[in-house]
Amino acid sequence: MRPAPASAVVIAIAALASLACARPEKSAAEASGAPAAAPAARPAPGSTAAEPREDRRRDPFTYANYEAVRVTDLALDIDVLFDEKALDGTATLAFERVDPAASTLVLDTNDLDIRSLEAGDGATWSPTPFTLGADDPDLGSRLEITLPENASAVRIAYRTHPNAAALQWVAPEGTAGKRRPFMYSQNQSINARSMAPVQDTPAVRMTYSAIVRTPKDLRAVMSAENDTGPTDGEYAFRMPQPVPAYLLAIAAGDIAFRPLSDTIGVYAEPSVIGAAAAEFSDTPEMERIASLLYGPYKWGRYDLLILPPSFPFGGMENPRLSFMTPTLIAGDKSLTGVVAHELAHSWSGNLVTNASWSDAWLNEGVTSYVENRVMEAVYGRERALMEQSLSLDQLKEEIAAQEHPELTRLRLPMALAHPDDAFSEVAYAKGEFFLRFLEERFGREAFDVFLKAWFNTHAFKAVTSDDFRAFLDDRLVAANPNAVSVAEIDEWLDGAGLPATTPAPKSAAFERVDQVRKAWLDDVTPASAIGANAWTTQEWLHFIKGLPEEASADRLKELDLAFDLTASRNAEIAFAWQMKAISAGYAPAMPAVESFLTRIGRGKFIYPLYRALKDKGDLANAERIFERARASYHPIAQRRIEEILQAQN
Ligand code: BES
Ligand code: ZN
């Protein structure tokens, strides 16, 4: 372990502000337009003494005293109050004393209204003293509870705030049906504390259960064993496997269900469910493949929930019930990589969890690798190679734009400004390519055995990069010491930028696209003759992203006349095209940009579009569109876009 010198850490924090194209979302700092001055490094709120060496197991983004007392179970009993935009009820937390002498339990909260707090043994309760600390805009408030000697649980009556960071309260107009409201949570990375008092760190796991009451005609669903009873406004949930708080999830709305197999299905609004079931009908095959490769699926059922279009992510791997954006429903299964990705988290992330967000690559990078293996098995090698190639291009772009090399390391500094800053293309694609490098060196067969054993050995545990390296040495390097050198692994884990040993995916389809793009740009082939009518979404994305920066509006018009790209119903193609249209000043696409921005709230698309409009000198237009669209966006997205539009650059 090489602790970064303090100055490097400060540089790293400043640099987070300039991470370009972070996936799946950019941090507030990034969106704000990269102030040169570093925000102050965060002290670790749970640690009392200054640490001489970096401790990569202690999560700096929680107040919880989990080294001394650990929450083991959460029982919620809550009402979903749409009019008040609040969850209201009780949270009962059972805990165990790791330190038998511990006399306080520290929880994370953010904007919670605590009405009463009792301690007990699960059967009898009595009020116990507590203090709520100062409010930090990101971390919230520390809730310190005095524990009577015989107490093994606390019961907290509370209500969430209407602006709780985790919760979006979608008005009927923002839904597919337009008649009933919808609400959902998004807890990763540190929003769980605005939904319930918890130990909000990936290092602590708990089982949970819930009683949830909604208006009678709405259905509640959770990341748990769902209630299969009638839609009657009262639902019971149970999550028997322990999960970190960031995987606690709830949604309520006019939600129907359709099975895809005995153990897999789709929840969505009634008007969306048919299209969703058709688009995602390969999910059972994906689960079969992943289980063959990496061991049995350990979570019982696997269902998908299709959210309203304002959901700010592509997908969120809530256990047993991934939350998905409706923008994946393209009609041709071309965007199902996100399903493979969220499903893959059932092994990497949900089962084997990073102990702190600075090791996010162990979560997202391993998942991206597994995702691609599943895509290869289900859709073939060429599709997998195209998706690898698109990821690598994105990673190279981001590394090139990154002024601060510390932030291109897989093992990130512990002192990030915000844990969301760990989720850049480095965690996803560099992590994915690291595993692909290992696969190449040790051979697929041996590497598959290794990765399966990694999941199995560390199931339901929190892990660090050091754990991964030790397991790698033990299970692969020891038997095959010449396959990789220590220096090569060092470079992958702690080196900046793209290692010299990065595998190069070669897609024959993309090579053909490169040739026809060039022939068209050189005026050798007219647009109508480039043979694009049979292209897959991935070929289109490669074609559009490879158009030169200086492509003129006239050239885009030629393409549009031949292929009607402005009217594309595929969200990825529409987005890639609109980015080029904005930078070329191609006016005929502008109504489509505005319509896209007022219909869709997925951050991956809308933040770059707003930024592009602004960079093109069209700030007034961007502000006008934002005014129209604003109320339909998730609160997090609203804040991000405000920062993008206000930034002084
Ligand atoms: N876990 C992430 C989403 C996330 C990350 C939410 C960090 C909050 C903080 C999810 O698995 C994810 O990566 N989603 C991607 C799609 C994926 C295929 C790259 C997305 O939302 O775009
Ligand atoms: Zn992910």
Image (tube, rainbow, N blue to C red):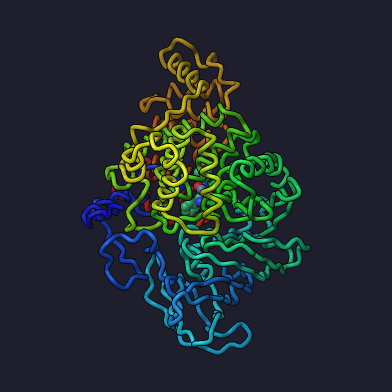
Residue at the limit of the structure toward the top, as seen here: 524
Q: Position of residue 351 (x, y in %)?
A: 55, 55
Count the labels in the image: 0
Residue at the limit of the structure toward the right, as seen here: 230
Q: Residue 393 occupies which quadrant of the picture?
A: top left
Q: Is residue 95 left or right of residue 392?
A: right
User: Residue drawn 54% across and 50% down?
Assistant: 455
User: Residue drawn 66% across and 59% down?
Assistant: 253
Q: Where is residue 463 in the image (x, y as percent from the top left)?
A: 45, 56
Q: In this orientation, does residue 567 appear?
A: yes
Q: In this orientation, does residue 628 appear?
A: no
Compared to 327, does 74 lie above or below? below
Q: Position of residue 603 (x, y in %)?
A: 48, 47
Compared to 160, does 414 lie above or below? above
Residue at the limit of the structure toward the front, as seen here: 479
Q: Position of residue 338 (x, y in %)?
A: 56, 42
Q: Nearer the viewer, residue 124 or 169?
A: 124
